[in-house]
Amino acid sequence: MIPEIPLGDWVTDLVQFLRDNLDFLFQAIRSLLGGLIDGLEWLFNLPPSLVMIALFAILAWRLRGIQFAIFTALAFALVDGVGMWEPTMDTLAVVLVATLFAVAIGIPVGILAARNAVVNAAVRPILDFMQTLPVFIYLLPAIMFFGIGTTPGAVATLVFALPPAVRLTNLGIRQVDPEVVEAANAFGATQNQILFRVQFPLALPTIMAGVNQVIMLALSMVVIAGMAGAGGLGAEVVRSVSTVNIGLGAESGISVVILAIFLDRVSEAMSAIGQPPSE
């Protein structure tokens, strides 16, 4: 018989050790993320909803054309009409902050993995673990380290959405034609010049596809993070489930869908900026 392995006790002891010795770090992260999210929430909710809808529609028109602008205006008017405007803006703030940090961490790690075989070998199993771990498990350490509120939801969202940024950056850099890199070497370019003037621009469409996936995963996790007290649409979804309120579930659910479509189309259009048109 295989002896019992107290893995759960080991993990509990590790979490307690980190809480006892790195509490200053968790407080700093809580202050940073909480301050950024609170600031964006204030900014998005400061103007009247009609002003924000007009701004979203103008952005949609500039990036995707008049048809998407009309859809954006009507869709966000529906969100406002069902009373989900403030939760939607709160969710947007959390998604943007989580995406910003996920991209800021993921792209450099992806570049390092593309250029170093040892780092790539170490990162791949970690990413596999992160992408197969049940999403609810992300909430447990986040709550243990940061308590209940917006910050643990943002941290869990950040960690959950991080892998695509690393994977697709790594993939994009590796897919750059070796002959192009050799030509840059032949002209005397340094490694940093090759990275930032050759590999990164050519890999940008793939990297931006990763950013798009980060945004979508962040939005999906924000709803689940409502269970940790993150607020926004996630809190409304959780409240609708706990009270078996079908109407509230429909209103919050359609708001999530509208926000997801808007962010997906906008990020997709932004990834095409500066790229040559396809033939």
Image (cartoon, rainbow, N blue to C red):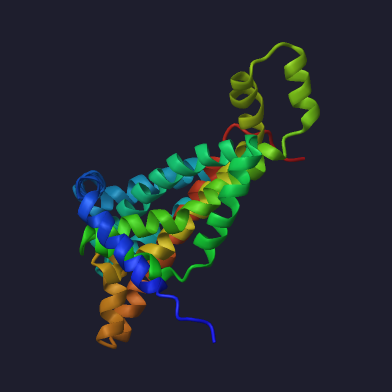
Front in this rendered view, residue 166 or 270: 166
Residue at coordinates 46% horizontally, 47% vertically from top-left? 60
Front in this rendered view, residue 259 or 161: 161
Q: Is residue 128 visible?
A: yes
Q: In this view, does 12 lie above or below 184?
A: below
Q: Work out which residue is located at the far top of the displayed protein and give it.
A: 188
- Which quarter of the figure is the N terminus placed in? bottom right
Question: In this rendering, would 21 be left or right of 203?
Answer: left
Write down the quadrant of residue 219 in the picture.
bottom left
Number of numbered markers: 0
Residue 141 horizontal/vertical position (percent):
32, 63
Question: In this rendering, would 135 be left or right of 9?
Answer: right
Residue 163 horizontal/vertical position (percent):
52, 53
Front in this rendered view, residue 182 or 278: 182
Q: Is residue 255 visible?
A: no
Question: In this rendering, would 187 be left or right of 203?
Answer: right
Residue at coordinates 68% horizontally, 33% vertically from top-left? 276
Front in this rendered view, residue 237 or 45: 237
Residue 174 horizontal/vertical position (percent):
69, 39
Residue at coordinates 25% horizontally, 78% vertically from top-left? 239
Write down the quadrant of residue 155 in the picture.
bottom left
- Which quarter of the figure is the C terminus placed in? top right
Q: In this view, does 109 lie above or below 264?
A: above
Residue at coordinates 53% horizontally, 62% vertically from top-left? 129
